[in-house]
Image (cartoon, helix red, strand yellow):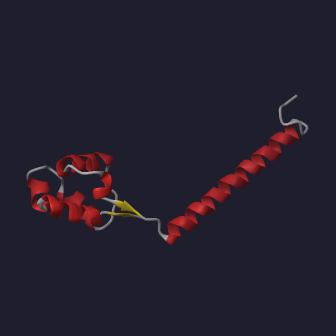
Amino acid sequence: MISYENLWSTMKKCGITKYQLIYHWGISSNTLRRMGHGEPISSNTLNDLCLILNCKVEDILQFTATEEEITAINERKEEIINFQRKKRIAATRKTGGSGCGL
């Protein structure tokens, strides 16, 4: 999960307000709303914010995987492994077990 909590403290350190981002720098109010709700933003916006605030990406966002995300990704990894295993078995059967088609 992406959190933008770091952005608000970085803005405070830099003395930049939401008003300034919107009216002086052209960051849309909807983008700031999205960030306030933990919703995705574009990499272009992230780049602009880094330039405006003279900071690194880590000063704007933080990634922490939730239990649900970890479970979902582990299930997907297992599906991929099983698919690859079945594909290898099918290829071995087609080639008579040599694995190289000879």
Identify which residue, 54 or 100, lies in the foreground: 54
Q: Is residue 74 left or right of residue 44?
A: right
User: x, y (%) of residue 68?
Assistant: 52, 70
Residue at image location 89% in from the left, 39% down from the top: 97
- Residue reaching furthest right? 96
Seen as rendered, the residue at the extreme bottom is 67
Q: Residue at x 14, y 58 (%)?
A: 14
Count the numbered circles shown. 0
Residue 93: image location, x then y, percent: 87, 42
Give left or right: position of 90 versus 59.
right
Residue in view at x 60 percent, y 62 percent:
74
Q: In which quadrant of the rendered image does the N terminus lie? A: bottom left
Which quadrant holds the C terminus?
Answer: top right
Residue 64 locus on image (x, y percent): 43, 65
Residue 47: x, y in percent? Answer: 27, 46
Q: Residue at x 14, y 49 (%)?
A: 26
| In this rendering, position of residue 13 left or right of residue 88 | left
**Residue 71 falls in image quadrant:** bottom right
The residue furthest top is: 102
Residue 88 drawn above or below residue 69: above
Quadrant location of residue 100?
A: top right
